[in-house]
Image (tube, rainbow, N blue to C red):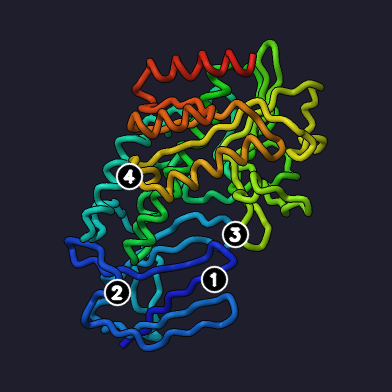
């Protein structure tokens, strides 16, 4: 018997998973009857699982791993060395369809991602090329970067997770980021951007952080924040109208998907620009990439959405220009209630719907020119 050791650290991107390829499908070794889990060790921020593997199966093992510093994906075929240790150093060609997927919902999400996100990824790549950017502008969003660089490799980096729920969560997170980044870059494109001064997108920009994206057209300079977080404490004189925004600990946490402010000073040095320097935003965009039933069609979900949208009007940098963009059509009754709240809606919005993109362009010119 030989020992295969899976290890991951909760505070880093380093992790590895072993799969067995039987000539037909890749299956995680926990699903192989002949392979036994013998140790499950948790030490501080490290988790190690050891498996006992029959020697005759080692040549069929493939390890998928991410590096400690970059999170970049790697995979290799394994072998036994003279000390009966498992060594994984043989190059191997892997395709996403080699993974065993028994969950129909996961399979549907993968197909939806291929259909909806591929054009967005192509648009992002074009923008990167036209403005001489590179994929390093995505800070900490390793999987999203994988998908933009190579969709198939990105999908492999998702399917390497043994658990279908982890796979679905990973796919939905990546789709969210791709959708947000595509819309952010589309704003710059539709406003006829001539120069980009900064492009650093990361998850959870704090309110004291500089803009993720600074760009300029012939007339104006713009600051754009991606996932701008507002975390605030309830004031002592909190009134009933604002109490809905705060939790039981009198803390409010809200994250704007996209926030745009037109510069009044022309400052391009990002170190001198912070979100909490501004009391007003010119535009806040709420991005919805999932089918309606996953984010809207029950009262609790709708109430939470309204609470977020109302908070964008109340708390700095506050704005009356709130745009909700959805890939899918929003039912009339929900759309009507949102519009009564002063929310502008563009639904059915995706790269192939040129009429909706033109509507978006007209809206941007009206609000930001």
The first of marks 3 and 1 along the sequence is 1
What residue is shown at x 53% (from left), y 17% (from top)?
363
Expressed as whole percent of the image width and height from the top left, the position of residue 324 reads 48, 31
Residue 127 seen in the current view: no
Circle on res. 29: 2
The Cα atoms of the two marked residues, 2 and 3, are separated by 26 Å
The Cα atoms of the two marked residues, 1 and 4, are separated by 35 Å
Which secondary structure lies at badge 3?
loop
The Cα atoms of the two marked residues, 3 and 1, are separated by 12 Å
The first of marks 4 and 3 along the sequence is 3
Crowd around label 4: few <14 · some 14–19 · many ≥20 (10 Å): few
Expressed as whole percent of the image width and height from the top left, the position of residue 39 reads 41, 87
Crowd around label 2: few <14 · some 14–19 · many ≥20 (10 Å): many
| Residue linked to disc 4 | 293
The Cα atoms of the two marked residues, 2 and 1, are separated by 20 Å
Circle on res. 69: 3
Residue 365 seen in the current view: yes
The first of marks 2 and 4 along the sequence is 2
Pointer 2 and pointer 1: residues touching (CB < 8 Å)? no
Which secondary structure lies at badge 1?
strand
Most foreground residue, 322 or 46: 322
| Residue linked to disc 1 | 9
Q: From the image, which quarter does the C terminus lie in? A: top right
Pointer 4 and pointer 3: residues touching (CB < 8 Å)? no
Most foreground residue, 325 or 49: 325
The first of marks 2 and 3 along the sequence is 2
Which secondary structure lies at badge 2?
helix
What residue is shown at x 40% (from left), y 30% (from top)?
335
Which secondary structure lies at badge 4?
helix
Q: Nearer the viewer, mark 3 or mark 1?
A: 1
């Amino acid at each position: 018997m030989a020992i295969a050791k899976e290890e991951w650290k909760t505070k880093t991107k380093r992790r590895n998973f072993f799969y067995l390829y039987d000539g037909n499908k890749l299956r995680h070794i926990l699903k192989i009857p002949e392979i036994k889990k013998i140790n499950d060790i948790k030490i501080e921020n490290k988790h190690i699982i050891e498996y006992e593997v029959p020697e005759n199966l080692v040549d069929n093992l493939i390890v998928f791993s991410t590096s400690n510093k970059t999170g970049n994906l790697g995979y290799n075929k394994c072998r036994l060395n003279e000390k009966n240790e498992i060594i994984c150093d043989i190059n191997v060609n892997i395709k996403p369809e080699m993974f065993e997927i028994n969950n129909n919902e996961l399979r549907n999400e993968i197909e939806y991602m291929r259909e909806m996100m591929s054009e967005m990824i192509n648009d992002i790549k074009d923008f990167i090329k036209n403005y001489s950017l590179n994929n390093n502008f995505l800070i900490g969003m390793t999987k999203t970067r994988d998908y933009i660089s190579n969709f198939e490799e990105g999908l492999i980096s998702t399917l390497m997770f043994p658990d279908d729920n982890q796979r679905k969560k990973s796919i939905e997170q990546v789709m969210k980021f791709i959708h947000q980044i595509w819309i952010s870059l589309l704003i710059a494109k539709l406003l006829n951007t001539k120069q980009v001064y900064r492009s650093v997108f990361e998850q959870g920009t704090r309110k004291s952080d500089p803009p993720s994206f600074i760009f300029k057209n012939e007339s104006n300079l713009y600051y754009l924040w991606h996932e701008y977080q507002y975390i605030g404490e309830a004031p002592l004189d909190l009134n009933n109208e604002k109490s809905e925004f705060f939790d039981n600990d009198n803390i409010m946490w809200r994250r704007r998907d996209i926030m745009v402010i037109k510069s009044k000073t022309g400052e391009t040095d990002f170190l001198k620009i912070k979100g909490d320097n501004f009391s007003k935003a010119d535009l806040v965009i709420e991005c919805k990439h999932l089918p309606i039933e996953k984010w809207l069609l029950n009262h609790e979900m709708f109430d939470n959405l309204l609470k977020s949208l109302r908070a964008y009007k109340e708390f700095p940098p506050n704005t009356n220009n709130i745009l909700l963009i959805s890939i899918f059509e929003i039912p009339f009754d929900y759309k009507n209630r949102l519009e009564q709240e002063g929310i502008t809606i563009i639904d059915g919005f995706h790269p192939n719907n040129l009429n909706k993109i033109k509507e978006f362009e007209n809206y941007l010119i009206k609000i930001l020119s």
